Image (tube, rainbow, N blue to C red):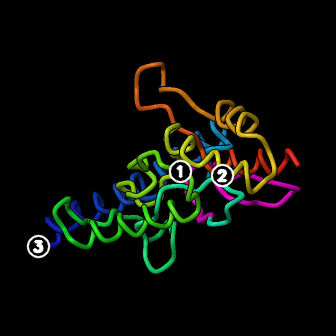
Amino acid sequence: MLAHLRPALVLLLVLTGLTGFAYPLLSTAIAQAAFPHQAHGSLVRKDGRVVGSTLLGQPFDDPRYFWGRPSATSPVPYAGQASAGSNLGPTNPALAEAVKARVDALRAADPEGAAPVPVDLVTASGSGLDPHISPAGAEHQVRRVARARGLSEAEVRRFVARHTEGRLLGLLGEPHVNVLLLNLALDGAR
């Protein structure tokens, strides 16, 4: 019996050491050396203190700021430990009600805006943590942000254009705007 058990226990210990300790330490060391900014969470600092991450959305509801995609995490918005989609299907009445409430909130914030509301401003991403909006989502908010900040719409559009990231390798994904970086740039303007 012990003859059969001993190799299994030795293998368990060896594989635990390799896959549970050696591999994670090695991959962490490589990440720290090759990609230190990303390995530390892609943190954004302002005046020496961390104000967010380029990888996680944040709640903005002040009219002076661009608003990101809604968060699907609950009860705390954009909580990384609760990352998940809403799991509400397109025929679910709760999703329709939530989208209508979000559209109403966007329309109330900019009553003069008659353009259709871009879908990314009223639906959460699959993770519920997306820090990006589409250029159309940013354009939809330009008038409100410009008015609230006392800037011209053209100035705000220039900020949006500077913070619009293209497709990865010119091929993958869609153009997008990181809401946190855009809002911080606007804060630095005045």
Question: Mark 1, mark 2: which one is toward the viewer?
Answer: 1
Question: Mark 2, mark 3: which one is toward the viewer?
Answer: 2
Mark 1 is surrounded, within 10 Å at the Cα level, by few (under 14), some (14 to 19) or many (20 or more) other residues, namely some
Q: Pick the residue in front: 97 or 51.
A: 97
Q: Which residue is pictured at 73% across the width and 52% down the height?
A: 147
Q: Is residue 86 magenta?
A: no
Query: Residues under labels 3 and 1: Cα distance?
Result: 78 Å
Residue 38 position in % (x across, y down): 61, 44
Q: Report whether 115 appears left or right of 53.
A: left
Mark number displayed over residue 113 = 1
Question: Mark 3, mark 1: which one is toward the viewer?
Answer: 1
For numbered disc 1, what is the local secondary structure?
loop
Mark number displayed over residue 100 = none
Of the numbered discs 3 and 1, the one sitting upstream in the chain is 3
Of the numbered discs 1 and 2, the one sitting upstream in the chain is 1
Q: Pick the residue in front: 31 or 154.
A: 154
Q: Which residue is pictured at 53% across the width and 37% down the height?
A: 135
For numbered disc 3, what is the local secondary structure?
loop
Disc 3 marks a residue whose amino acid type is: Met
Q: Determine which residue is flagged by label 2.
A: 180
